Amino acid sequence: MHGIDPAILGSSRVEGFSYTLNRRNRKEDPDQKRSNTSYQRSPKTGEESLIQRIEQLEHELAYTRQEVEFLKKIQEAGMEEQKVWESKRLRK
């Protein structure tokens, strides 16, 4: 998943992500069976596509902010582990 080991995220997060994707797909197309073939949406008017693009960019920004916070926490945890390891090593 985007270069992140799923074991780090945990099974509940991965399953939650899968659940969310499946739920969104059912909302878009509740009666149609999903297949491997791609489909095209009807062309949007200029204003609709602009609003849709803004919403998409806002979503990407929020996701990126969450990702940065997650990576900061991973880095902090690694630094804490390193401090613990160094303190144990110095005691010997």
Image (cartoon, helix red, strand yellow):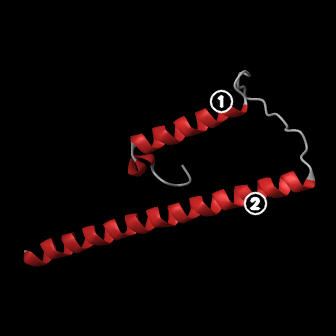
| Left or right placement of residue 36 versus residue 80 in this view | right
**Residue beneath the point at 85% across and 38% down:** 41
Q: Secondary structure at mark 1?
A: helix
| Left or right placement of residue 43 versus residue 61 in this view | right
Label 2 vs 1, first from the N-terminus: 1
**Residue beneath the point at 32% across and 66% down:** 77
**Residue beneath the point at 74% across and 22% down:** 32
Which mark is drawn over residue 60? none
Which corner quadrant of the image does residue 78 belong to? Answer: bottom left
Reply above or below: 65 against 12.
below
| Left or right placement of residue 71 versus residue 91 in this view | right
Using the image as rendered, state which of residue 42 and residue 8 is in the foreground: 42
Q: Check disc 2 and report the residue beneath it.
A: 54
**Where residue 50 appears, x then y in whole percent?**
84, 58
**Where residue 49 appears, x then y in whole percent?**
85, 53
Reply above or below: 6 against 56.
above
Q: Secondary structure at mark 2?
A: helix
Q: Amino acid at mark 1?
A: Arg
Q: Amino acid at mark 2?
A: Ile
Which corner quadrant of the image does residue 75 belong to? Answer: bottom left
